[in-house]
């Protein structure tokens, strides 16, 4: 009963048969690999994935993890089933009491138990195989004779009549046993090769996992460095802001104190003048003329200020600007110090000028930093397909890290890259060239291998970064945001020149 229950647990809930290559989902349910792949392919059209049994949803197509233990158990039951099937083939001669057969004789077309097999072996030398009832599979469909030979020329098993009088007359034959041994060797060799490929795949998977772990650690470290630098930058800017705001507050407090003092003084003057007005009114109301004439007005000692605003003063914006300028200069010095700390590699533009002697159908202005296509009818040799002009830089790069920017907003069709052929005006873009080109669509090219690049917006400015020692050449679309376009990896052996090519109605400019 327990064995029957376990057998039931080993059935796939999709095909209701014993598991074949069982795989498991995150929810814990297992299915035949082929069954589950079919279900997931069907769910893909709906854009939602779920377990066929418990309906647990997955945002993305779930990975299929092989359940090795379940696979081993299922294989054990499958082998047991085969033994049971064999046991169902009974001895032909045991008619009174059924006995399982141990061998089947191909010539006699009978199955025998061990007892009858001993007597059979003593009488004749026939071919014996594992117990089977499917003798038709080992007989020739044309001559109804047993298959004894293998025809390597046609790749089929044949009988004697096929070889002597049939379609295989004159063909070189092999005995089935010999051909089977050869096939086993071929299969073993193929299995060994596949095992090696499996190991290689496992090694590459491990390499990728190690690479991902290293890059995750690197990303964490770079994130920490970026946060650390911006914390320093924010603190430096906060210090500048605090100094400027402190200066504003100082001037405001000083002005407020002066205004308060002057207001108190003016209030006192106002009170004295009001008292004097009251005194004058009182004197004017009296009849005593002598007293009136003898009275002296108290306004003589009341001094009123003239331009009090001028005395108080205004906010000194020049002083504030001076404080802010000094603070920002200090901030700039601090940024230079951060740069010297080399938390990140400094990006400085290479000073690139164009070599007019390499210009072919190219007009180069006096500043040597622009190039425009002109049809001069010059001989064009080894130019990239569909391009009609070229020009190289004066300088070459044989070490270090270099960066330059190219404005292609006025170019209809253009090429930007590096080439080891730049020093020779009679040679162009050959194998030692790596470049980005736009001819209606953007591609990265080297050695006649072209990789299409998908972009969302037209490229206006291209940034080129060359790390000669590391063998990396990267192209970026400079915009908001900055987009990585393509990176070449190679082993650079020769000096490299910046390389450019144009077609009609096209002009490029090297940016300062």
Image: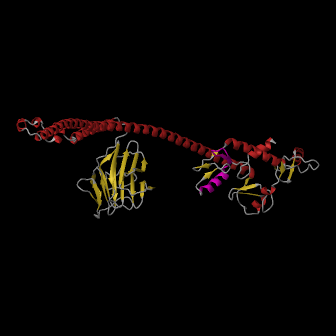
Which residue is located at x 76 percent, y 63 percent? 165
- The spot of residue 200 in percent (x, y) is 57, 43
- The spot of residue 164 in percent (x, y) is 76, 61
Q: Nearer the viewer, residue 160 or 210?
A: 210
Q: Is residue 352 left or right of residue 17?
A: left
Give the residues drawn in magenta, as a range: 22-44
Q: How is the image coloured?
A: secondary structure
Q: Is residue 47 left or right of residue 216?
A: right
Q: Nearer the viewer, residue 152 or 69?
A: 69
Q: Is residue 45 left or right of residue 142?
A: left
- The spot of residue 500 in percent (x, y) is 33, 55
Q: Is residue 489 above or below residue 151?
A: above
Q: Is residue 239 left or right of residue 119?
A: left
Decide if residue 92 is in sight here. yes
- The spot of residue 502 in percent (x, y) is 33, 59
Decide if residue 419 is in sight here. no
Q: Nearer the viewer, residue 356 or 483?
A: 483
Which residue is located at x 63 percent, y 51 percent? 50
For the N terminus, which image quadrant? top right
- Res 235 → quadrant: top left
Task: Name the residue at the right extreme.
Answer: 96
Decide whether residue 26 is among the magenta residues.
yes
Decide whether residue 24 is among the magenta residues.
yes
- Res 71 → quadrant: top right
Q: Nearer the viewer, residue 351 or 159?
A: 351
């Amino acid at each position: 009963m327990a064995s029957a229950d376990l057998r039931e647990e080993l059935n796939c809930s999709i095909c209701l048969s014993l598991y074949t290559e069982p795989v498991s989902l995150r929810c814990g349910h297992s299915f035949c690999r082929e069954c589950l792949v079919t279900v997931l392919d069907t769910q893909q059209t709906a854009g939602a994935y779920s377990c066929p049994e418990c309906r647990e949803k997955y945002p993305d197509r779930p990975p299929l993890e092989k359940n090795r233990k379940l696979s081993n158990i299922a294989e054990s039951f499958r082998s047991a089933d085969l033994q049971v099937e064999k046991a169902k083939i009974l001895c032909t001669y045991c008619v009174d009491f059924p006995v399982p057969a141990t061998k089947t004789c191909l010539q006699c077309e009978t199955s025998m138990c061990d007892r009858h097999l001993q007597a059979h072996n003593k009488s004749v030398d026939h071919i014996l195989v594992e117990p089977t009832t499917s003798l038709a599979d080992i007989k020739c469909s044309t001559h109804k004779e047993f298959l004894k030979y293998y025809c390597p020329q046609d790749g089929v098993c044949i009988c004697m009549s096929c070889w002597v009088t049939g379609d295989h007359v004159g063909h070189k034959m092999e005995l089935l046993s010999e051909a089977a041994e050869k096939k086993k060797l071929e299969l073993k060799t193929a299995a060994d090769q596949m095992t090696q490929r499996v190991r290689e795949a496992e090694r590459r998977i491990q390499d990728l996992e190690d690479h991902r772990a290293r890059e995750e650690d690197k990303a964490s470290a770079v994130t920490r460095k970026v946060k650390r630098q911006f914390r320093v930058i924010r603190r430096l800017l906060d210090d500048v802001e605090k100094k400027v705001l402190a200066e504003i507050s100082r001037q405001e407090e000083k002005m407020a104190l002066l205004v308060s003092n002057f207001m108190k003084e003016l209030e006192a003057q106002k009170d004295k003048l009001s008292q004097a007005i009251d005194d004058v009114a009182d004197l004017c109301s009296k009849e005593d003329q002598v007293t009136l004439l003898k009275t002296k007005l108290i306004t003589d000692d009341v001094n009123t200020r003239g331009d009090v605003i001028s005395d108080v003063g205004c906010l000194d914006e020049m002083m504030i600007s001076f404080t802010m300028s000094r603070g920002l200069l200090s901030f700039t010095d601090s940024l230079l110090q951060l740069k010297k700390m080399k938390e990140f590699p400094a990006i400085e533009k290479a000073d690139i000028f164009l070599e007019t002697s390499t210009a072919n159908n190219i007009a180069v202005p006096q500043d040597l930093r622009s190039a425009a296509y002109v049809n001069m009818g010059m001989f064009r040799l080894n130019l990239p397909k569909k391009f009609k002009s070229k020009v190289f830089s004066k300088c070459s790069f044989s070490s270090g890290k270099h960066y330059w920017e190219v404005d292609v907003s006025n170019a209809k069709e253009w090429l930007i890259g590096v080439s080891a052929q730049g020093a020779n005006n009679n040679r162009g873009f050959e194998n030692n060239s790596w470049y980005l080109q736009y001819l209606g669509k953007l591609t990265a090219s080297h050695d006649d291998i072209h990789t299409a690049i998908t972009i969302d917006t037209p490229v206006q400015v291209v940034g080129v970064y060359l790390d000669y020692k590391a063998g990396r050449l990267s192209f970026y679309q400079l915009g908001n945001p900055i987009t990585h376009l393509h990176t070449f990896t190679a082993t650079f052996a020769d000096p490299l020149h910046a390389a450019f090519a144009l077609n009609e109605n096209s002009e490029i400019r090297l940016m300062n």
